[in-house]
Amino acid sequence: MAKFVVFLYAATLLHHGVVANTGDCEDNISISLLQMDIHLSAHADANQSEGIRSMMGSRHTSNLVAGSLDGKSRQGLDMSSDHAERLPDFDKPRVYMGNHCGGTSWIHEFITQLLEAHGYKTLVINVSTTLVLGINGETVIINPTDPDVLREQHANATKEGRTLVFMPSWPHWEPWRLQESVEIVQAMKDLGSYFVGSYRGNAVDRLVCDVKDGFLSWPGYPISAQTGEETDIRGPDKRDVVDPDLQVYLFPEKVVEAVETEFNVEKSTMSLLAKPGMFPDMKHFSYEDLYAFEADAGLEKGVTVWSKLLGELGLVADPQKLRAALGPLVGTRPLQPHSSQIYNFEQVKDTLAPHREYFEYLRL
């Protein structure tokens, strides 16, 4: 019976197109924050990069989202909740950080399931921007920036021999809120936490997601592909619903600024997290690399990248367990062109064409 803590930190603030305080599969999986020129290097030749540069939908809906591996993925995994022996580092928090619209829900779910498969037992605790904490169906109000709360939850979980999956998201998606919370950062370090982060390399995919979910309205709006009329936003609560009719209309005169803004969201966040006193040694993995096995990268590349991510969380992954989890999902989500998501794709393509560093994000 083992336990650990996973933090999901969603961080971004956009205001009128400005980022306040402005962030393939194998060798470039983890990237340093000083190498975050992803518009020049990490996405170069994006349309020919084995499908790991981009994703099919606005917010990726994996077969693993919804809190559990599907039936096929469970085959061959020891998902028993009874583990007689606690793992040596079960009480060390696992800290995961990533921006919204960066596949964080899926990544968090998959991390949790793979840790379960390796002998950890989990207890999921969700912290929303309203500071509502759900514990096994119960709701309490906490301050996620209070180090005493963190220590208390950690102590309780340790006593119970359970895995604490802690997912705080900060008001207004502000990454600097964590920087201001020196005590909570130090508390995480004092507890011997492991840290890992992710980023979304394709800024056009981030933009489509932000418009669909209503995080951004100035670059465009959701639109019905069938009627051509403006429609309701998808909203985060419907992110797992696949609706081919729901596309986005992007204002051509704002699309360059919007794509640049999305690029800077990831770059600035990662740069902030790398500052002294924060998490300068934390490795970041691209969302595109992590889900590439579901597109066309193949099983072994998936095993490689997930082994490296789990290694950052203190786990020497069992390749057979990873193959059992990833195998049934290989190739199940082939990449689709952006014309299936952007209603006025031709306008957007023509607008981005003179800006090679952003044009390469498009899947033609």
Image (tube, rainbow, N blue to C red):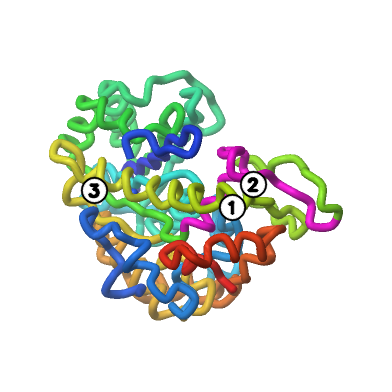
- The Cα atoms of the two marked residues, 1 and 2, are separated by 6 Å
Say whether residue 66 is visible.
no
What SS does tag 1 mark? helix
The Cα atoms of the two marked residues, 3 and 1, are separated by 32 Å
Q: Which residues are magenta?
A: 203-226
Give the residue type at disc 1.
Answer: Val
Q: Nearer the viewer, mark 3 or mark 2?
A: 2
Pick the residue in front: 42 or 352. 352
Residue for badge 3: 194
Mark 1 and mark 3 in contact (Cβ < 8 Å)? no
Residue 238 position in % (x across, y down): 67, 45
* Image location (x, y in percent) of residue 87: 26, 53
Report if the CB atoms under discs 3 and 2 are less than 8 Å apart.
no
Secondary structure category for the residue under label 3: strand
Q: Which residue is mark 1?
A: 208
Residue 243 lies in the magenta stretch = no
Q: Marks 3 and 2, Cα distance to the nearest angstrom?
A: 33 Å
Viewer-proximal residue among 55 and 43: 43
Residue where numbered disc 2 is placed: 212
Kindly identify the amino acid type of the residue bearing the numbered disc 2: Lys
Disc 3 versus disc 1: nearer the observer: 1
